[in-house]
Amino acid sequence: MSETEACRSFQTRSSCPLCHEELIIRWQGDEIPYFGEVMYVTAACQCSFRFADTLILTQKEPMRYVLRVENLEDLNSRVVRSTSGTIRIPELGIDVEPGSISDSYITNIEGVLDRIYKVVITATKWAKEDGDEEKHSKGLEIQKYLEETIEGKRPLTVVIEDPFGNSAIISDKAQSIVLDKDEAGSLKTGMIVFDATTSDVELDASDSEHQLKE
């Protein structure tokens, strides 16, 4: 392995936050269109703890991307979602916020909607088992809306916000907006954040992916 390759691919060791056994963290450098150099970070423990993220190595501003999905071509727009990215679909009242076990991924708008669709199916099933007719009915309504959007029959809006600027929608139609300090500060990050100006350590362990809102 050359010196350059070694710098782009290496391992570090830490302790698992769940079982406290040794945890091997793998780092793999790469370069992707539009973003330049990135670093893939993965870790998995035998106790079931796992972590994955894609770090963009260039400094980014906190960003919001908005795409109005109106046709099948829009469904092919590329999406980069890091573990600190929040996805919103305003028409359906859906917020997918980062949590402690969130994964990063690169997909397209259809892939994002399919992920959400599968979660909604599960949440709808739970609502039926719990006897909550209102949430069950709402879940079926959301499923139908997503199905029609994926078929290109119904428009909706996809919003991605990231306080670290590591998420994006790549499309000529997408609006990109720099978030101000208050907007960025209100977003969940799904990770431990060290504030250099204080002695506080904030742990954002929320995970709203499995919530079905009324």
Image (cartoon, helix red, strand yellow):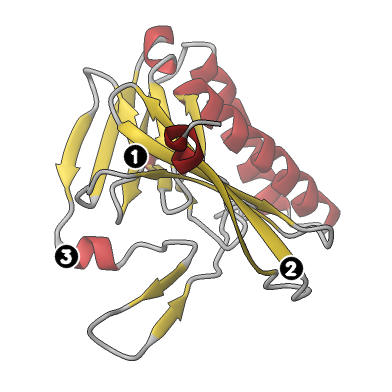
Residue 41 located left or right of residue 118: left
Q: Which residue is mark 2?
A: 22
Q: Is tag 2's residue or tag 3's residue first in the polypeptide sequence?
A: 2
Q: Secondary structure at mark 3?
A: helix
Count neighbours of disc 3 (C-alpha within 10 A) and say few if under 14, some if 14 to 19, many if 20 or more: few
Count neighbours of disc 2 (C-alpha within 10 A) and say few if under 14, some if 14 to 19, many if 20 or more: few
Q: Position of residue 111 (x, y in %)?
A: 55, 25
Q: Which residue is mark 1?
A: 159
Q: Is tag 1's residue or tag 2's residue first in the polypeptide sequence?
A: 2
Q: Position of residue 121 (x, y in %)?
A: 71, 38
Residue 104 located left or right of residue 135: left
Q: Which residue is mark 3?
A: 181
Q: Is tag 3's residue or tag 1's residue first in the polypeptide sequence?
A: 1
Q: Cβ–Cβ below 8 Å for labels 1 and 2?
A: no
3D distance between C-alphas at marks 3 and 1: 18 Å
Q: Position of residue 71 (x, y in %)?
A: 38, 10
Q: Nearer the viewer, mark 1 or mark 2?
A: 2
3D distance between C-alphas at marks 2 and 3: 37 Å
Which quadrant would the N terminus be assigned to in this image? top right
Give the total of numbered labels. Answer: 3
The amino acid type of the residue labelled 3 equals: Lys
From the viewer's side, name the closer residue of 138 and 186. Answer: 186
The amino acid type of the residue labelled 1 equals: Val
The amino acid type of the residue labelled 2 equals: Glu
Which quadrant would the C terminus be assigned to in this image? bottom right
Residue at 38% over, 25% down: 32
Q: Secondary structure at mark 2?
A: strand
